[in-house]
């Protein structure tokens, strides 16, 4: 298993380009199943989850061409299989995003039920309940979700999400876009990735209004056609590099990002003393205040509030801030696994229920540590960059799922980081 060897203590300086958003590219690739015509997606990040999503499309019978590394031209004209097997779903939960489009276009879908994962139980009951409300018969057979639309087509309905769900909202949007009649989604997730998917679906001929708001209205259409679309920049990668500049007392120009998509993160980091200037609509300049960092509390909540996907990175930063900060996680029940690894490096963190209290500033010292999930890995890499001495981060396959060429990007801005590989490294790295 690959590892990172990081020698900390260097100030990161220079320019960094943000890649396309993994969490937008995943549903957009799934949406290509909705039409027999070709859909071209640009700015698809070269990360493991997208390679898995591509494999899923190909297993179903779609043809995926990549004339350039980050451009995917997908033709789902010859899809003949309607099933996402356990081998794929167990490596990537987002495979459940195939359910909505398959059910909408072919009236049937079978997707292995994802189990729990490192950050919690993560059920998909809300997706399934919504499909039933759209007229599907849904059953669980030998660990698979089997869904069928009785007359081959779903029927528009009023969907009330009891809890805000990002992929749940996306799955329902993709199911309802080809349903007969109108669907209204109440308590919809408002993440920028929802808006991006709706934009693609509308380019394909869909009639979706209100994406990015709490209520989304979808007028079902008979067919969808081809389209061309560029995936939005990754707001979590952007946030991670802002923290990288701050935690190493560096200075970074972050290009090709979309600051509007991470207002809550920028606001919170400014409160702690990180200087963030918006040079233009897609470029940020970040540096840590010479006064150092001040501890501030944070609570994760659905967009537009502070995202759970930035919680781990924020915790790493708070180990370097003066004072005590309380970090409350309200989205996932078990998302503090990075805390014990940070403590091995010298952090002072106390966890009680869904709140972690970080007391800083503590000196971090390099140590062998273990990544447990995607964002936890990012948090540990950040801590290692700020630590004195050498850190070995084990199990970095988690970070490969969502951060494009992270080693190369970090080296370009002055980090001392190597990938120790047992197998062949990701070719773009
Ligand atoms: C997506 C993101 C993930 C991010 C998360 C929260 C993708 C591919 N992944 O995950 O990076 O951390 O949003 O912003 O976009 N829930 C249920 N039943 C359901 C669905 C969800 O109880 O049917 C619960 C979950 O367990 C969790 C909460 O709702 O507690 C929010 O989860 P959800 O928004 O669905 O997360 P994902 O879409 O899986």
Image: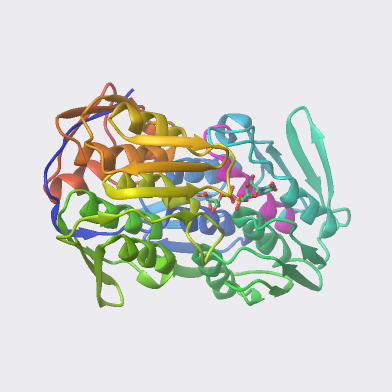
Q: Give the prevailing secondary structure in the magenta stretch.
A: helix
Quarter of the figure with residue 9: top left
Q: Residue at x 49, y 51 (%)?
A: 308
Q: Is residue 103 magenta?
A: yes
Is 95 or 391 nearer to us in this picture?
Answer: 391
Q: Is residue 398 left or right of residue 392?
A: right
Per the rendered image, the range of residues in magenta is 90-105
For residue 223, above or below residue 149 = below
Image check: 145 left or right of 35?
Answer: right
Q: Residue furthest front?
A: 323
Residue at (35, 70) in percent of width and height: 259
Given residues 233 and 311, the one toward you in this image is: 311
Residue 206, given in percent of the width and then of the height, sits at 64, 73
Residue 359 against residue 116 in the figure, above or below: below
- What color scheme is it? rainbow
Can I make out residue 291 in this image? yes
Taking the image as drawn, is residue 428 in sight? no
Looking at this view, is 300 or 14 the one in front?
A: 300
Residue 425 to residue 410: above or below: above
Q: Quadrant location of the N terminus?
A: top left
Residue 114 screen position, x and y as percent: 64, 36
What is the count of numbered marks? 0
Residue shown at the point (70%, 65%) measured from the top left: 187
Q: Is residue 241 above or below residue 207?
A: above
Residue 196, x across and y down, in percent: 50, 68
Locate the C terminus and report the quarter of the image it occupies: top left
Where is residue 419 drawn, in percent x and y? 22, 31
Taking the magenta stretch, the answer to whether it contains residue 397 is no
Q: Choose top left, top right, bottom left or bottom right for residue 49.
A: top left
In the foreground, 317 or 196: 317
């Amino acid at each position: 298993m690959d590892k990172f060897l990081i020698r900390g203590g260097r100030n990161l300086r220079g320019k960094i380009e943000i890649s396309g958003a993994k969490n937008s590219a995943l549903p957009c690739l799934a949406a290509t199943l909705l039409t027999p015509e070709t859909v071209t997606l640009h700015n698809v990040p070269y990360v493991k989850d997208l390679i898995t999503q591509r494999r899923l499309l190909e297993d179903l019978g779609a043809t995926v061409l990549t004339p350039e590394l980050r451009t995917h031209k997908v033709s789902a004209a010859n899809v003949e299989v309607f099933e996402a097997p356990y081998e794929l779903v167990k490596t990537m939960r987002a495979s459940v995003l195939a359910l909505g489009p398959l059910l909408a276009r072919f009236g049937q879908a079978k997707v292995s039920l994802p189990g729990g994962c490192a950050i919690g139980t993560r059920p998909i009951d809300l997706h399934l309940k919504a499909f039933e409300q759209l007229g599907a018969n849904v059953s669980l057979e030998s660990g698979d979700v089997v869904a069928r639309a009785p007359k081959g087509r779903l029927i528009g309905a009023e969907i009330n999400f009891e809890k805000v769900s990002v992929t749940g909202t996306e799955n329902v949007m993709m199911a309802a876009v080809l349903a007969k009649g109108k669907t209204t989604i109440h308590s919809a997730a408002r993440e920028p990735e929802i808006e991006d998917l709706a934009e693609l679906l509308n380019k394909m001929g869909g009639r979706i209004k209100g994406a990015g708001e709490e209520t989304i209205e979808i007028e079902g259409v008979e067919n969808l056609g081809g389209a061309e679309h560029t995936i939005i920049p990754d707001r979590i990668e952007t946030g991670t590099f802002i923290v990288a500049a701050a935690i190493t007392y560096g200075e970074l120009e972050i290009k090709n990002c979309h600051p509007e998509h991470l207002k809550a993160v920028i606001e919170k980091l400014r409160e702690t003393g990180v200087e963030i200037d918006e040079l233009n609509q897609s470029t940020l300049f970040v540096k840590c205040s010479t006064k150092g960092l001040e501890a501030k509390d944070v609570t994760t909540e659905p967009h537009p509030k502070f995202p759970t996907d930035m919680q781990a990175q924020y915790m790493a930063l708070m180990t370097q801030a003066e004072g005590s900060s309380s970090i409350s996680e309200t989205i996932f029940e078990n998302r503090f696994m990075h805390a014990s690894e940070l403590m091995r490096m010298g952090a002072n963190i106390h966890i009680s229920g869904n709140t972690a209290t970080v007391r800083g500033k503590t000196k971090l010292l390099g140590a062998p540590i273990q990544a447990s999930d995607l964002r936890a890995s990012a948090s540990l890499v950040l801590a290692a960059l700020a630590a004195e001495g050498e850190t070995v981060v084990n199990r970095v396959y988690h970070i490969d799922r969502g951060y494009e060429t992270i080693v190369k990007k970090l080296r370009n801005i002055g980090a001392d980081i190597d990938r120790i590989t047992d197998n062949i490294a990701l070719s773009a790295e």
